[in-house]
């Protein structure tokens, strides 16, 4: 009985075997379709990641070439003639030549209210408006050459005496600040206005001319 009981299930199994094989085939077809889908999605994912990488690198290179630089302010020349004369304050002059460069590839600057201030021991001794407003193209340099005298120079005999006392020690130190309001222009987009402040110490020799170590110095530029 046990043998028939054992054979019966075998018989039973043998009979539907073609059907079971068919079932297996569809199962494999299903599996093949599955792995095909997986492979296609892998390829798509790979293409997508590659594109993302290329776009990222392109954006990085673009940013490198477009990234904003601050204006570059240099004191090319500075002098206070007549420093060797005791009564030089009567017709004192301060002459300076400052350059402002826009070193950006593609960013323009709108300058407003560009002003220069000359300080001696933190006291403003002269100031002048350099320009009301102008647009500076990328890769362009603007020269500000000015002579401060009379009303733009706040001079008196006491101050001149202080200069002369410093001069007796070899050097008179002044400070030249340039301030402006700046907007950045990228293509058709304009930034909001930022206050720019640059500041340079300037040493002047006994004859009133700028000392070589202070010549062509790049002034630090701050935005506030
Ligand atoms: C001011 O400096 C610039 C740059 O060196 C120079 O080209 C220009 O001739 C100077 N201007 C004067 C008036 O000295
Ligand atoms: C630079 O600016 C000056 C005016 O300051 C202008 O004459 C000159 O054409 C400009 N150069 C370029 C390359 O735009």
Image (cartoon, grey):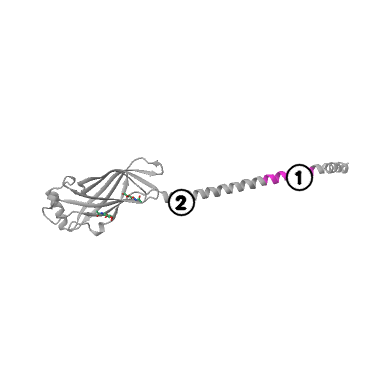
Q: Which residue lies furthest to the left in this view?
A: 87
Of the 4 image quadrants, the one containing the C terminus is top left
Residue 124 showing in the rendered view: no
Q: Mark 2 points at which residue?
A: 61
Give how far across and how far down residue 184 sits, in percent: 36, 44
Q: Nearer the observer, disc 1 or disc 2? A: 2
Frontmost residue, 111 versus 124: 111
Please rate how many residues cluster around mark 1, counting C-alpha atoms within 10 Å: few if below 14, some from 14 to 19, many from 20: few
Q: Which residue lies furthest to the top in this view?
A: 192
Please rate how many residues cluster around mark 2, counting C-alpha atoms within 10 Å: few if below 14, some from 14 to 19, many from 20: few
Kindly identify the residue that appears in the image at 77 percent across and 42 percent down: 23
Is the shortest distance between ligand 2 and the CB of mark 2 under 8 Å? no
Frontmost residue, 31 versus 53: 53
Give how far across and how far down residue 108 sits, in percent: 36, 46
Residue 175 showing in the rendered view: yes
Q: Is mark 1 on a helix, strand or loop?
A: helix
Give how far across and how far down residue 1 sits, in percent: 89, 41
Q: What element carries label 2?
A: helix
Describe residue 36's horizontal placement relative to residue 159 as left or right.
right
Residues drawn in magenta: 20-35
**What's the magenta bit mostly, secondary-structure-wise?**
helix
Q: Name the residue under label 1.
A: 25
Is 77 colored magenta in this rendering? no
Q: Mark 1 or mark 2: which comes first in sequence? A: 1
Give how far across and how far down residue 189 sits, in percent: 40, 41
């Amino acid at each position: 009985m046990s043998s028939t009981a054992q054979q019966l299930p075998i018989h039973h199994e043998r009979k539907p075997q073609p059907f079971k094989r068919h079932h297996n085939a569809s199962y494999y077809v299903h599996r093949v379709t599955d792995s095909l889908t997986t492979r296609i999605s892998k390829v798509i994912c790979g293409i997508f990641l590659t594109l993302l990488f290329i776009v990222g690198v392109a954006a990085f290179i673009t940013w490198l070439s477009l990234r904003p630089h601050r204006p570059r302010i240099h004191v090319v020349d500075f002098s206070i003639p007549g420093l060797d004369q005791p009564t030089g304050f009567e017709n004192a002059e301060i002459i300076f030549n400052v350059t402002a460069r826009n070193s950006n590839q593609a960013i323009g600057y709108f300058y407003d209210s560009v002003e220069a201030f000359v300080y001696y021991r933190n006291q403003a001794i002269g100031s002048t408006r350099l320009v009301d407003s102008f647009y500076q193209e990328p890769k362009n340099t603007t020269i500000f050459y000015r002579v401060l005298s009379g009303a733009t120079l706040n001079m008196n005999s006491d101050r001149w005496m202080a200069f002369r006392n410093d001069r007796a020690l070899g050097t008179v130190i002044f400070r030249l600040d340039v301030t402006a309001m700046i907007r950045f222009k990228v293509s058709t987009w304009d930034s909001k206005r930022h206050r720019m402040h640059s500041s340079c110490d300037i040493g002047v020799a006994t004859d009133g001319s700028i000392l070589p170590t202070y010549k062509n110095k790049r002034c630090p530029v701050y935005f506030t």
